[in-house]
Amino acid sequence: MARTKQIKNTTETIKTTKTTMTLEQYHEINSALKDSNDVSLYNSETLLQYHLWDLYIKMSDQPDLIFDDFLSNLPLNTQASETSSPPEKKKKTTTQAPTDELIIARARYKAMFGKAPGRMKLENIYKKIDNEEPIESYNDDEFTQGIPDLLKTHHDKSAKKTKRSPSPKKSSPKKNSPKASPTKKKSSTTDPMLKKNPDLDEHLKEVRQKYYSMYGKWPHGKMKIPSILKKIDDAIGDMEPAQPDLDPQDEEIVAQAIDQDLHHDDTTYEKIIYQGVEYTHDAKTGQVFNENHELVAHKDEHGAFIWIDPKFQHYHEVDDDYEAPGQIDDGTETEEE
């Protein structure tokens, strides 16, 4: 009867040692072993915890205890058969959203030290915040005032991620559907040069407009008037006038229109060097244009420039090629185009 009671007590003790053995459980096992000295009643885990308690108590009483001697006298149960259950598979845990406290702590850490805390735990972040000095630019009052906006921004981002709809599946093209032909980008009907230079010279506007009407595109921004006119002349030379069956009166109207359209611009342009800087000069009107085709001055009969605006004279004098009047020979160098 006593043996049965002892086994029941031992079984209850074993059931409770799945975690950590208490001092009360240790005394129960200790008294049972003193009576029977039968270690087969306990499994290895229970005996290990019992001996750890025994070691703790003996070392408290005997600080000079020889540890090796204690280990050699340990009675272990080598015959106890234990059915070890297979390890449970870890369930995949979904990443939990960070709490507001963690969000604020991480943001404060970054503001105080100028770097992110990485994967630091919350308690470690608080230790750094409490024990270390922040950078000079950190202002605690400003940070505290910005906490509501910080949390709102984080929650808005989280809401967007959860509301993001999955991308639709791409539908395979139908076999009989024709392939879409690539469309060419249409050229704008407005001269792009006007966006950069709203005060563009009227003569240059007309020349560029004529180029556009013939080629369906605007001339390059760096093309000068002589080059544009040459392109226009080449296009006119390639044209073959149509021969429609018209009444005599209509033929006369068409002839006049063609003659007006093919009217050749007899303006003479030349490159000139004035005080070291290159310009385009209209010999017929005396107008002078810069490299951006802007009318900047008029050339008088003595070869001097009469600037239409002081800013163009300023641009002229700050040009890298500018030479003061005392540094150059009299006269100007011209080059016919």
Image: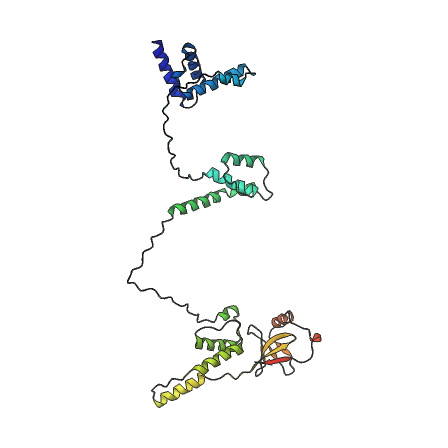
In this view, 163 is above or below 44: below
In this view, 126 is above or below 237: above
Name the quarter where the C terminus is drawn. Answer: bottom right
Left or right: 178 in relation to 128: left
Q: Residue furthest right?
A: 326
For image coordinates 53% across by 78% down, the residue present is: 226
Q: How is the image coloured?
A: rainbow
Counting from the top left corner in percent of width and height, residue 164 is at: 38, 48
Q: Residue furthest bottom?
A: 248
Counting from the top left corner in percent of width and height, residue 170 is at: 34, 55
For image coordinates 44% across by 86% down, the residue present is: 259
In this view, 234 is above or below 25: below
Q: From where the camera sits, is residue 46 visible?
A: yes
Q: Residue furthest left?
A: 176
The quadrant holding residue 158 is top left
For image coordinates 44% across by 75% down, the residue present is: 215
Q: Nearer the viewer, residue 199 or 86?
A: 86
Left or right: 305 in relation to 258: right
Q: Nearer the viewer, residue 276 or 80?
A: 80
Q: How many marks?
A: 0
The quadrant holding residue 89 is top left
Q: From where the camera sits, is residue 144 visible?
A: no
Q: Nearer the viewer, residue 97 or 7?
A: 7
Left or right: 71 in relation to 286: left
Counting from the top left corner in percent of width and height, residue 203 is at: 52, 78
Name the quarter where the N terminus is drawn. Answer: top left
Counting from the top left corner in percent of width and height, residue 315 is at: 62, 70
